[in-house]
Amino acid sequence: MPDRLTIRRPDDWHLHLRDGAALKAVLPYTAHQFGRAIVMPNLSPPITTAVAAQAYRARIIAALPANADFTPLMTAYLTDDSDADALAAGFADGAFVAAKLYPAHATTNSAAGVTDIRNIDAVLERMAEIGMPLLIHGEVTDHRVDIFDREAVFIDTILLPLMSRLPTLRIVFEHATTEHAVTCVREGGANIAATITPHHLLLNRNAMFQGGIQPHHYCLPIVKRERHRLALLESATSGDPHFFLGTDSAPHAVSAKETVCGCAGIFNAPSAIENYAEIFDAAGALDRLEAFASINGPRFYGLPVNAGSLTLERAPSVVPALVKLDDRDAIRPFRAGETLGWSIVEEDLS
Ligand code: DOR
Ligand code: ZN
């Protein structure tokens, strides 16, 4: 196995950047590693219009460190009232590159999400016609369905029927967490793909309870059994173009995680590519990291791969213990304070 690896500059196809002080605090970590990111629209209030997306994009660009070379790719938050013409106009003029389906109440800031997928039939038909990707948070919200089964039930009751109704709709099944998800995506043809996070590749559900409750390992979709982690690992490292990098880095203040009703989300941006390198290395698949991190994503979205490169070395790097948010609060990164086996040593932004 090589000790040094140069790949095309990678992109993050699923990212939460938040706004205000949090945006300023977290953005440098992503901009340092990735050329582009698909930015999630679940702000409060959510990004539902092209005007709001353009304003948010401007705030992201204003928060970038000097000399950064980073392009935010904006998404529209779908609601029961989303309008097909407005969405198509936003896609045509580049305000949005995709639209995100949050089932109402599935996760953070999803209360305004879609209550029944049939309410947005007209929107989805138009998206299929114009080639606008649909990004899916794939979990049902029925409280009678066990939290560990919500992804599989979503696939059977909502995703598969949708794929039959609209076979030309381009779908990214975000943050896949189960064997069922990766099988459906692998066998689902050229119009479906999935992102896979570092934490779902590294953790099984024991991690939430290891030696006591671990709020920093709580995210949605929740981490699953070991056999699901192994299926994700096999898919991510297989080279199959259906699978690509999406961190789902989701920062929350420590005070919002370590509390009576802690928020869902894992902030992995500070060590995202180092984590993926370690995972691919351990799987004997370093030669496939570039496809997963830098090539499969842009191919699916119909975008060029990045011109620059990123060089990693098998050398220790330490994850920050905390990232300061403001005078009172901080965000705790995934694997805070741990030493990882890979480091970024060079970046060519050309
Ligand atoms: O764990 C999660 N956090 N899952 C999501 O779907 C949303 C995200 C967030 O925005 O915090
Ligand atoms: Zn997310």
Image (cartoon, grey):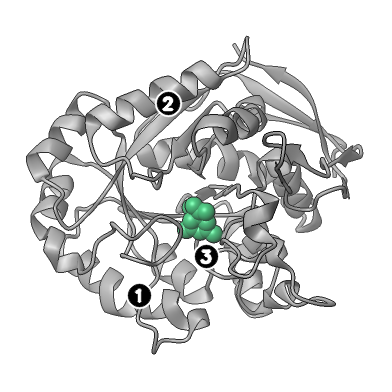
Q: Secondary structure at mark 3?
A: loop
In the rendered view of the protein, which quadrant contains the N terminus? top right
Going by the image, does 124 lie left or right of 141? Answer: left
User: Could one spot residue 286 in this view of the protein?
Assistant: no
Q: Is residue 46 left or right of residue 297?
A: left
Above/below status of 256 relative to 232: above
Q: CA distance from mark 3 to mark 1?
A: 14 Å
- Residue 107, quarter of picture: bottom left
Residue 286's x, y, as percent?
Answer: 73, 46
CA separation, marks 2 and 1? 32 Å
> Looking at this view, is 205 or 192 the one in front?
205
Image location (x, y in percent) of residue 211: 85, 77
**Closer to the camera: disc 3 or disc 1?**
3
Tell me the crowding category of disc 2: few under 14, some 14 to 19, or many 20 or more residues within 10 angstroms, Cα based. few
**Mark 3: amino acid:** Leu
Q: Which of the pair 159/336 is nearer the observer?
A: 336
Residue of label 2: 304
Q: Residue at x 44, y 38 (%)?
A: 39
Task: Please name the residue that numbered disc 1 is placed on.
Answer: 154
